[in-house]
Image (tube, grey):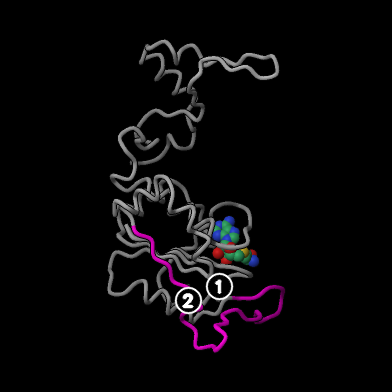
Amino acid sequence: MTFHIITLFPEMFDSYIKRSILGRAIEDKKIKIKFYNPRDFTKDRNRRIDRKPYGGGPGMVIEAMPVIKAIEKAKGGKKKVKIIFLSPSGAQFDNNYAKKATKNYSDIIIICGRYEGVDARVKKAFKMEDVSMGNYVLTGGELPAMAIIDCVSRQVEGVLGDFNSLEDSRVSSPDVYTRPEVIEHKGKKYRVPKVLLSGDHKKIEEWKKNHKYPKLQNVKN
Ligand code: SAH
């Protein structure tokens, strides 16, 4: 899977993607992440790409043409490409979306907006989907893009080890415990639920089922 990120701030991604599981996935060539800065695709002498919105209003809008050219560069001649236009009013991103994307595409282009967003004509020039990370407004699309890279990459075969198998293919619980069995804080003792120490796998699975992620259990395979 190759991610093509269109962003004014590629350096924002550095520390997150270079560490831990994603860092290893890149090293192992399971995933690839490429960056395209719209500023590199403008003819403006000062590399300026933001302008006042037509119709008035606050904030600046990112020009369409530098973004369109960046998308063209990312797309090349590739066929199985999905284009995501990040927007707080798009369709809610979730595990199912990530799973389908992994199955059907080899390349995902993600357009990160900033300021008031990107000129809407970009959405007419290519087939793409408006995708939201949640019902809140952020200052830019970089965090949502990182969340998408992270979640989709977990679905790519070989990115997670056996130990870390995907939540929707096993019984998983959001409540997890590790050593020691008892901790003490401000005079109070906190213990690990007894069942997890019992070695009784049937009972443990039962306990996990009652502590599951209600939404993730509905993920379609
Ligand atoms: N005024 C715009 C929002 C601009 S926020 C509006 O009302 O739609 C600036 C950019 O941040 C957006 O273009 C988008 O790329 C990104 N962004 C902000 N919140 C987001 C969210 N919840 N999901 C996905 N992208 C988001």
Q: Is residue 88 visible?
A: no
CA separation in Å, label 1 and label 2: 8 Å
Q: Is residue 10 above or below residue 191?
A: below
Specify whether tag 2 is near ligand 1 (CB below 8 Å).
no
Q: Is residue 177 above or below residue 154?
A: above
Question: Label 2, on which residue?
Answer: 67
Asked whether the residues under the numbered discs 1 and 2 touch, taking CB atoms below 8 Å apart as contact, a structural biologist would say: yes
Q: Is residue 6 magenta?
A: no
* x and y, in percent, of residue 3 in the image: 38, 61
Q: Amino acid at mark 1?
A: Val
Determine which quarter of the picture holds residue 113.
Answer: bottom right
Seen from the viewer's position, the closer of residues 186 and 62 is 186
**Corner quadrant of residue 190:** top right
Residues in magenta, as a range? 32-61
Expressed as whole percent of the image width and height from the top left, the position of residue 214 reads: 49, 33
| Helix, strand or loop under label 1 | loop
Confirm if mark 1 falls within 8 A of ligand 1: yes
Q: Amino acid at mark 2?
A: Val
Q: Earlier in the sequence, mark 1 or mark 2?
A: 2
Q: Residues within 10 Å of mark 1 (few under 14, many from 20)?
A: many
Mark 1 highlights which residue?
A: 118
- Secondary structure beneath dot 2 equals helix
